[in-house]
Image (cartoon, grey):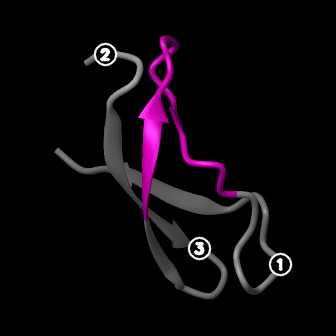
Amino acid sequence: MARNQRTKVTIRCNVCGEKFTLRGRKEPSGEVDTGFKQCLCNNDRHFMIHEES
């Protein structure tokens, strides 16, 4: 996948269960950068992140 292509990512908060569907850019290290910082419940650490195919 080229660096400028975007991928769909689903992020679920492990504290309150809120679900976010975002688009992000795949980094060369394999991580996806979406710019997501924290959930509505102020959780900024405990997430389940799933990259869609």
Q: Nearer the viewer, residue 17 or 40?
A: 40
Residue 30 occupies which quadrant of the picture? top left
The disc label shown at residue 14, or none: 3
Q: Which mark is residue 42?
A: 1
Crowd tier of the residue under label 2, counting other residues whose Cα lies within 10 Å: few below 14, some 14–19, many 20 or above: few
Q: Amino acid at mark 2?
A: Ala
Q: Secondary structure at mark 3?
A: loop
Label 1 secondary element: loop
Q: What residue is at 59 percent from the left and 73 percent from the top?
A: 14
Q: Nearer the viewer, residue 29 or 17?
A: 29
Q: State yes or no: residue 17 in magenta.
A: no
Q: Which residue is mark 2?
A: 2
Q: Which comes sooner in the sequence, label 1 or label 3? A: 3
Left or right: 48 in relation to 40: left
Which span is picked out in magenta? 22-36
Q: Amino acid at mark 1?
A: Asn
Q: Farthest left residue? A: 53
Circle 1 crowding by C-alpha within 10 Å: few under 14, some 14–19, many from 20:
few
For this orientation, the residue located farthest to the front is 4
User: Marks 1 and 2, how far apart in space?
Assistant: 33 Å
Is mark 1 in CB contact (under 8 Å) with mark 3?
A: no
Please give the name of the residue rendered at 63% of the width and 88% of the height, measured from the top-left corner.
16
Which residue is pictured at 79% across the width and 63% down the height? 44
